[in-house]
């Protein structure tokens, strides 16, 4: 049986393909994960999963072919598929990178690999018990997991690179049902090293419940809204990232296509893709085409500084790649961010709340409900949000919808908080308060 960890077999495979194609690239990934799930306050299941696979991209007669497989004992089918598809594939503008040097980066903690299923279950039990101690009437779900991923790239131009990443993560979700009222709270984190932040997660969800026990009528109209880091990700950053994507730039569909060097939003807002933050799950030594990672300022004081490109979209735009290729095993590369960082402001979250006479604090949205994503429009129901009145949070709002435009909102910026928080291991952002957000009843 073929072992994907065997470098000799990958070299032989590439040599075989090179005889039939003008250029070729192998991308492989192995993943071992152990998630432990708790449901309704009790341990539900402990799983152990291991997957591996390889993808082949070829350039033949000026066109790109792509195929992938998890069946490593049937690789001739992989080769045949990639070569066959190349007849109908897109025209190749890219050139695979040659051998490169890479910066050292800490994204692997061997102690994570040593965690047993019992260790993970113990973390989960502490998480559930801590939450029950505050709120015994809530039904709590939790997931604690360890993951080890190895990613590698090899091509006929001499690139041959591989690195391993470890991830330790936990999440806690609470559901409180009172009659027809359903309340959901959640928090969690992930890191490339073991971090015991159980008390922080429990305190976070407990505070969400404390603020949500009193239900109040929502204000309506054009109002100031303070977005938590999670809401910043779904409402404000998603459309902006779509506009900065090199694919939409090359297709001419991005509203930012001709805005390079122009100020498009408030000068207090800056956004950087920084893949060199140690032990952050979003960080990486090279992108998924083997190009050495680089720090990419995207918006600098509201000015469009760069777009994100992979090799193909960069070639279309006649620029260099920003080492922003990402892909899954079954899809070819496309531009994507690694580790996004939003600049911090000057005021604390509490100070911003005190400055709001009538508005909302939005924590979670139902489906994010984006309208015209590329245009920056958003429209979504609030899953968890609070009314701010007289500089204080007075209760949770229900049946409430917000809508607006991300670019307009960030041009109506009130304040950015002075402390950034992690969202999903690949975003570090503070709270952001914007004026003029449309708030309405969704009933």
Image (cartoon, grey):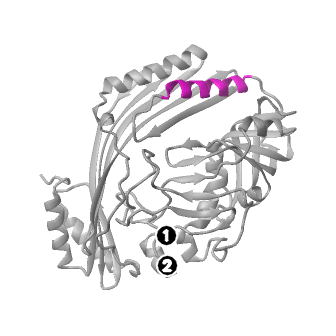
Tell me what residue is drawn at x 42 percent, y 73 percent.
Answer: 311
Tell me what residue is drawn at x 70 percent, y 26 percent.
Answer: 181
**Which secondary structure, mark 1?**
loop
Which percent across, then down, holds residue 147?
35, 40
- Residue ID for mark 2: 319
Q: In the image, is 11 to the left or to the right of 395? A: left
Q: Which residues are magenta?
A: 197-213
Instruction: Locate residue 175: give its quadrant.
Output: top right
Q: Residues within 10 Å of mark 1 (few under 14, many from 20)?
A: many
Q: Say above or below: 174 vs 355.
A: above
Q: Residue 181 versus residue 317: which sits nearer the camera?
A: 317
Q: Is residue 345 visible?
A: yes
Q: Residues within 10 Å of mark 2 (few under 14, many from 20)?
A: few
Q: Residue 387 versus residue 286: which sits nearer the camera?
A: 286
Specify the principal SS of the magenta part: helix
- Magenta-span inclusion, residue 205: yes
Instruction: Locate residue 36: give its quadrant.
Output: top left
Q: Residue 95 versus residue 217: which sits nearer the camera?
A: 95
- Residue ID for mark 1: 309
Q: Is residue 69 visible?
A: no
Give how far apart the Cα atoms at labels 2 and 1 are. 9 Å
> Do labels 2 and 1 touch, CB within 8 Å?
yes
């Amino acid at each position: 049986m073929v072992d994907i960890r065997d470098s000799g077999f990958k070299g032989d495979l590439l040599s075989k393909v090179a005889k039939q194609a003008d250029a070729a690239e192998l991308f492989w990934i192995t993943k071992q994960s152990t998630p432990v799930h708790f449901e309704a306050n009790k341990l539900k299941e402990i799983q152990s999963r291991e997957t591996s696979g390889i993808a082949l991209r070829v350039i033949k007669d000026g066109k790109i072919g792509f195929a992938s497989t998890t069946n490593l004992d049937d690789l001739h089918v992989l080769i045949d598929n990639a070569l066959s598809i190349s007849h109908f594939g897109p025209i190749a503008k890219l050139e695979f990178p040659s051998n490169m040097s890479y910066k050292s980066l800490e994204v692997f903690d061997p102690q994570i690999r040593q965690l047993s299923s019992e260790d993970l279950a113990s973390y989960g039990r502490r998480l559930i018990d801590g939450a029950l101690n505050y709120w015994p009437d809530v039904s709590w779900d939790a997931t604690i997991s360890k993951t080890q991923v190895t990613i590698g790239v090899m091509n006929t131009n001499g690139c041959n690179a591989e690195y391993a990443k470890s991830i330790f993560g936990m999440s806690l979700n609470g559901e409180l049902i009172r009659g027809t009222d359903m309340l959901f709270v959640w928090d969690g984190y992930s890191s490339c090293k073991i971090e015991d932040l159980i008390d922080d997660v429990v305190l976070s969800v407990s505070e969400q419940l404390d603020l949500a026990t009193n239900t109040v009528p929502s204000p309506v109209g054009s109002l100031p809204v303070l977005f938590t880091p999670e809401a910043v990700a779904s409402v404000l950053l998603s459309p902006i990232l779509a506009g900065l994507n090199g694919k939409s730039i090359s297709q001419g569909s991005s509203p930012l296509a001709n805005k390079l060097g122009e100020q498009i939003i408030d000068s207090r807002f800056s956004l950087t893709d920084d893949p060199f933050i140690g032990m952050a799950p979003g960080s990486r030594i090279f992108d998924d085409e083997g190009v050495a990672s680089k720090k990419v300022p995207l918006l600098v004081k509201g000015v469009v500084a760069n777009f994100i490109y992979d090799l193909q979209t960069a070639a279309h735009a006649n620029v260099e790649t920003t080492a922003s290729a990402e892909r899954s095993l079954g899809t070819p590369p496309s531009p994507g961010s690694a580790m996004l960082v939003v600049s911090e402001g000057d005021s604390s979250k509490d100070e911003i709340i005190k400055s709001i006479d009538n508005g909302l604090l939005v924590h979670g949205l139902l489906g994010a409900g984006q309208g015209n994503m590329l245009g920056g429009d958003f429209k979504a129901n609030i899953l968890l949000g609070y009314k701010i009145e007289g500089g204080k949070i007075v209760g949770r709002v229900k049946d409430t919808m917000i809508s607006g435009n991300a670019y307009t909102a960030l041009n109506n910026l009130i304040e950015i908080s002075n402390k950034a928080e992690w969202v999903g291991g690949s975003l570090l952002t503070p709270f952001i308060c914007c004026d003029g957000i449309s708030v309405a009843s969704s009933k």
